[in-house]
Image: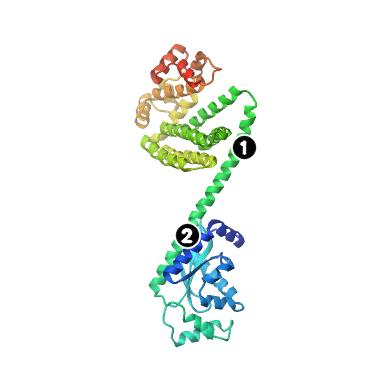
């Protein structure tokens, strides 16, 4: 439509048109259209110039060929295509017009992302049987091009007579087809740009990762675990920018091992996506929503055939979950629950009590407990325990830390009590968990 029309130099618009459209596919479509309807069609840029080469000149009708052969004829037609293509773009639908040579044509605008890139021009046709006055008009319209009308009149007699209803239907049909093809081309172009951007980001992160690996191997491993934990925290806190940055680092870790093959990349990215979905559920997304979202994205990941496109899919999944999380956090009650979770995530290593947590968000302990249970389906203290144990599991993967140290770091002053809680929730002791991670 006219609102939001983007102004771009005509040369750039032609380049975009040629980038987005598959010439051979469009040729096939136009030939099928002509064969079915007996109407000729062409695609022109915003200057009225055809996107097809001169070898396709024979696709136009004999009347147009004759006009083009006359001095100034082709330029006059291009001017009309430019003018009526623009008019069609302004109203956002096909425009039926009488061409400079006196016959009926129509222009269907090609608009991508609010930008007019060209038009489908269809015709020439007659909408009535020629009468005496028509031949007089035809002479008047073309007197600047020629004074020999015999060939011109002969070409006109070959043109089909089409009813107004058929002209209207044909114009809309070509409008829909052309814009559908262009939209597909735009989506493909956008996807290629996204992958190129993703490649650049991954390349930068891989360079950083390689620098890190020049240090101690244990530090490199701890670097990945820390980024994973930080990403989980940022998702739960609703910090999309920080979460995306951390996900990019984790994807770079996976790409460093790209020599293991695409199946390794796919499996590793799926594992990350599962982690993202778990955090999204913790942030309030329902389990049913998470299952539905994961199903769609995992199907797409299995379909993709390059490591970069698979990594891009993980970023899109994170975006999708953040859309849901943002909507949830806009609800007044959910906002308070998010504040409670944020406080716990930032302070879970302290000796927290229910009264301290509720007081931090200016609620009474009883109301805070009821509200949190309603939204999260678990108590505040159960959530605190879960956060502490996730932190503990991250630390247990690093052999540098003793069990006593880990207990203290995650908020337990008594290592025996920490072990008891861990075993109750996980079914195994911290030491057993650590040993399992080594295999």
Residue 384 rendering spot, x and y as whole percentages = 43, 23
- Please, is residue 80 above or below residue 434 in the view? below
Image-based side of 286 in relation to 306, left or right: left
Residue 348 rendering spot, x and y as whole percentages = 47, 22
Q: How many marks?
A: 2
Q: Residue drawn 56% across and 78% down?
A: 67
Asked if one can make out residue 91 in the rendered structure from this viewpoint, the answer is no
Image-based side of 140 in relation to 131, left or right: right
Q: Secondary structure at mark 2?
A: helix
For the residues labelled 1 and 2, say whether their Cβ atoms are less than 8 Å apart: no
Q: Residue drawn 48% across and 63% down?
A: 28
Res. 105 mark: none
- Please, is residue 191 above or below residue 385 in the view? below
User: Disc 1 marks which residue?
Assistant: 204
User: Disc 2 marks which residue?
Assistant: 179
Instruction: Place residue 176 in its image quadrant.
Output: bottom left
Camera-side residue: 138 or 415?
138
- Please, is residue 359 above or below residue 101 in the view? above
Mark 2 crowdedness (10 Å alpha carbons): few <14, some 14-19, many ≥20 = some
Q: Secondary structure at mark 1?
A: helix
Residue 143 rendering spot, x and y as whole percentages = 57, 84
Camera-side residue: 395 or 55?
55
Image-based side of 434 in relation to 287, left or right: right
């Amino acid at each position: 439509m006219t609102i939001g029309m983007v102004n771009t130099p005509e040369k750039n618009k032609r380049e975009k048109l040629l980038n987005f459209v598959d010439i051979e596919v469009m040729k096939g479509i136009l030939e099928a259209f002509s064969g079915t309807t007996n109407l000729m069609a062409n695609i022109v840029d915003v200057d009225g110039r055809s996107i097809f080469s001169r070898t396709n000149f024979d696709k136009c009708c004999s009347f147009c060929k004759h006009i083009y052969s006359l001095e100034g004829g082709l330029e006059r037609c291009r001017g009309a295509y430019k003018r009526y293509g623009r008019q069609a773009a302004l109203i956002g639908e096909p425009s039926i017009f009488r061409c400079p040579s006196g016959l009926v044509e129509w222009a269907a605008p090609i608009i991508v992302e609010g930008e007019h890139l060209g038009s489908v021009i269809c015709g020439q046709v007659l909408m009535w049987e020629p009468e005496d006055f028509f031949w007089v008009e035809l002479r008047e319209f073309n007197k600047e091009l020629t004074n020999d009308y015999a060939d011109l009149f002969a070409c006109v007699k070959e043109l089909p007579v089409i009813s107004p209803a058929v002209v209207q239907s044909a114009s809309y049909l070509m409008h829909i087809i052309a814009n559908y093809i262009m939209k597909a081309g735009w989506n493909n172009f956008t996807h290629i740009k996204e992958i190129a951007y993703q490649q650049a980001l991954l390349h930068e992160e891989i360079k950083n990762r390689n620098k890190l690996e020049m240090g101690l191997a244990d530090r490199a491993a701890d670097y990945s675990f820390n980024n994973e934990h930080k990403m989980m925290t940022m998702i739960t806190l609703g910090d999309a920018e920080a979460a995306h940055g951390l996900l990019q680092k984790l994807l770079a870790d996976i790409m460093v091992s790209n020599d293991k093959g695409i199946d390794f990349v796919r499996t590793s990215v799926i594992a990350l996506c599962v982690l993202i979905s778990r955090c999204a559920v913790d942030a309030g997304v329902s389990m049913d929503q998470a299952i539905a979202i994961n199903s769609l994205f995992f199907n797409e990941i299995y379909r993709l055939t390059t490591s970069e496109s698979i990594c891009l899919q993980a970023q899109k999944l994170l975006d999708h979950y953040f859309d849901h999380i943002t909507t949830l956090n806009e609800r007044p009650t959910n906002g308070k629950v998010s504040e409670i979770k944020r406080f716990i995530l930032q302070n879970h290593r302290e000796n927290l009590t229910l009264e301290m947590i509720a007081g931090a968000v200016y609620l009474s302990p009883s109301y805070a407990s009821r509200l949190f249970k309603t939204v999260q389906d678990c108590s505040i203290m159960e959530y605190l325990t879960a956060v502490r144990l996730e932190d503990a599991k991250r630390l247990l993967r690093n052999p540098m830390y003793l069990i006593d140290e880990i207990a203290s770091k995650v908020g337990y002053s008594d290592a025996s009590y920490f072990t008891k809680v861990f075993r109750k929730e996980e079914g195994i002791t911290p030491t057993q968990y650590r040993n399992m991670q080594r295999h």
